[in-house]
Every structure is written in C-alpha cells, then in structure tokens.
Image (tube, helix red, strand yellow):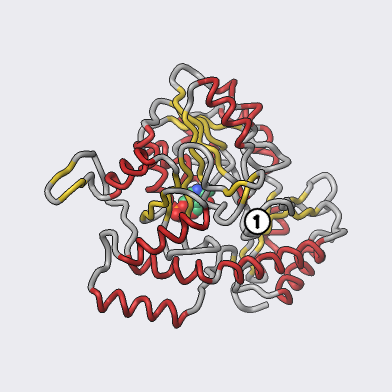
Amino acid sequence: MKALLHVGRPNIGNRERFLQRVNEILDRRWLSNNGPVVQEFEKRVAETLGVKHALAMCNATAAIEIACRALGLKGEVILPSYTFVATAHALHWQEITPVFCDMDPATHNIDPTKIERLITPKTTGIVGVHVWGRGCDTEAIQEIAARRNLKVMYDASHGFGCSKAGRMIGTFGECEVFSFHATKFINCLEGGVVATNNDELAYQMRMMTNFGFTDFDKVEYLGINGKMNEISAAMGMTNLEAIDEIITVNRQNYEAYKAGLANVPGVSVIDYDPAERNNYQYVVIEVDPEVCPRNRDEIVEALHAQNIIARKYFWPGCHRMEPYRSLQPNAGLLLPETERVSAKVIVLPTGQAVDVETVQRVCHLIRTHSKNR
Ligand SMILES: Cc1ncc(COP(=O)(O)O)c(C=O)c1O
C-alpha cells in the first residue's frame, strides 16, 4: 500500500458549495466578527443538538478555557487522564490544577466511582470527556456534583451527533464543548462550539469570546479573542449538510473493521451502543497482551511500515505528559486502568478518505502481524 493513510484525514462535504460560500464571503467582505455564516452555523448546530445556545469559537481548547472562566472554575478540577492533552492544558492554562481520575475500562470514560475520593476543599468542578463519542455516565456525575456542590461541564469534542440515554450530547452539565478541528468528522478547518441552555452563561461566554465587548467602546468582561471566522463556518456548514453521508461511511467502515477483525485472537473492536445515536468517527481496537502473540506497539509499527498511520490515542495518559508528569509524579498510582488500557489501544483510519476495500486490507495486515512470527 503506497498512499499514506492516517487517522483523522479530513472529510470534505460538497466542494462546489463550500467554494460558493467562500466567494459570497469575499464579496460581502465580512470575514469575521459574528458574520452571517457563523450565525447560520450556530443556529444549525443548536438545532441539531436541541440546545438554546451554540457559541462558535476558534477551537475547542480556547472554548474550554472560556467556559471554565465563565463558570468560575478555579482551584482543582477533576477530569480523566485518558483524554487528548488539550482538556488538561486548557485547565492548567487557566491556572486550575487538573486532578486526574481513572477510567472505566468498559467505556474508556471517567469512572464516577473513583471521583469522590479526589474531591478536596479546593475542588470546584468536574470536566467529563465523552471519549470516542460514547457518553459519560452523566447521571452518576451529576449526582456527585449536586451532592458535593460542584459544577459540571463536558469536553464533547468527539461527541457531535451522539446521544447518551437517548438525550443528545450537548445538553448535559452546565455546558458542553465540541471540537470541529480538521480531524473531527465534521470540521471547520479549526473550530469549536460551546453548547448550553443557560442564558446568563451563554451571554458571558459570548462577551468573553470577543474581548469582553458589550457594545461599541464598552468592555464589561476580561475577554479574549476566541471568535470563529466566516471561512471556518462555511466549511462547518458544508460538512453539516453532509453529516448523514459521512456517518453512513463511518458506519460502513466500522462494520467492515468489525467483520475483518472478528476472530483475531486478542484483538477486539470497541462497541457503540446501537440504542444510541453514534457518529462512528473512531474505530478503536484493543490488543490484549495476554492473548495476542504480538503487542500493540509491534502492530502499530507494522502498520506504519505500510504507510498506515494508526495512532495510540491517548497513550500514555495526560498524567505522563508534561507538565503534569513533573508536577504530579505519583498520579499514576491512582490510575491503573488508564495505564493498562492506554497501552492496548490503537485507533484506525476511517472517514470519507477510506473505503471498505482499504479497511479490508488494513484488517488483513493486522491479522497477519498479530500472529506469531
Ligand atoms: C478530547 C479532546 N479535547 C479537546 C480537543 C482539542 O480540540 P481543538 O483542536 O478544537 O482545540 C480534542 C481534539 O483536537 C480532543 O480530542
């Protein structure tokens, strides 16, 4: 296999429609500052999620920071270590101490039974992450938060178009943050959205996203520049128009991987609950070191050698990355499942750039390279 095939290759909706939108934007000479395409994108996202407010921002990392500040999170905040490092960095950048909680190996999400032991007098909130778009145990998290007087928000970067217990992700906690980065199944080139039903919070976040301006020459908040530009929103709109097609392709690829890897000893593809809405944007396998004759790293190396850039997300866990590794050198003692599971996971390429025939070839390689030499 010659062509490079990597995880997160962008989906692109109707190119002509995108270029038409770009031309309209250039004709209008309205490139940023809450332009009409951003407004349209926000409306469409809010409708899809069934929330009152969807605030478009430049990326999810900045959006998490803005949401944290607007919520008044400070001191310590509990989050999973098993997430993309941006979740932890956003908190730390706001001078909040990220306190890493272990994951549930069955769901890859934060384990609510391990949250309470991490709460101290400095704890102000919990940031759950819907890893791979599979919803956290929002009910258990909410129950703990209500009892311990903590605020809850979610990093829903993976969860656009997904549901938990029949309810759309985007409607849980005080607010939820989505990523529309180029690697996400719906992308804005770069982009993020905060979804909330809280009017006051939405108002504050909107002001903060635009330097704190409430009117011409009037600044009421410490704000920053977190705005989404019009071209990004045009890409987002164009992809949103193709969401059903993209999910269909993702699902076909996912089913093909499942079929192609069935009966490979020690290799399992993680499941998506068919009773929920799923975007199938991640194909995630676990390589069980006790059953599979070859380890995860050997399989990844074999794939890379064939130009298939599979990824070891989110290995080795945020707690083993800087600055957390130095600041909290013993954090791993409380994170046994994160350490165990993150050493088993491989994320495989999917999306519109990958067809079923290619999936079958990748499966063939995994089958071949997971056997004894
Ligand atoms: C779980 C998670 N959180 C946050 C981010 C950061 O998103 P962005 O790149 O839009 O800042 C990502 C991915 O990029 C992610 O996967």
Position of the N terminus, as image quadrant, is bottom right
Q: Position of residue 95 (x, y in %)?
A: 36, 33
Task: Name the side, left or right, on which 35 lies relative to 337.
Answer: left
Residue 203 location, quadrant:
top left
Query: Which sits in the foreground, 265 or 226?
Result: 226
Q: Residue at x 37, y 76 (%)?
A: 21
Position of the C terminus, as image quadrant, is bottom right
Q: Quick one: which residue is furthest to the left in this view?
A: 217
Q: Quick one: which residue is furthest to the bottom in this view?
A: 16
Q: Residue at x 40, y 36 (%)?
A: 92
Q: How many marks?
A: 1
Q: Position of residue 46 (x, y in %)?
A: 46, 54
Classify 118 as above or below 46.
above
**Amino acid type shown at disc 1:** Asn
Task: Name the side, left or right, on which 246 lies relative to 263.
Answer: left
Q: Position of residue 224 (x, y in %)?
A: 26, 46
Q: Residue at x 67, y 61 (%)?
A: 301
Task: Name the side, left or right, on which 75 lies relative to 84.
Answer: left
Query: Which sits in the foreground, 203 or 179?
Result: 203
Query: Which sits in the foreground, 197 or 19?
Result: 197
Residue 282 location, quadrant:
bottom right
Circle 1 residues within 10 Å: few <14, some 14–19, many ≥20: many
At numbered mark 1, what does the secondary structure look like: helix, strand or loop?
loop
Query: Ligand 1: does it lie within 8 Å of the C-beta at label 1?
Result: no
Q: Residue at x 50, y 78 (%)?
A: 14
**Residue for badge 1:** 278
Task: Name the side, left or right, on which 68 lies relative to 80.
Answer: left
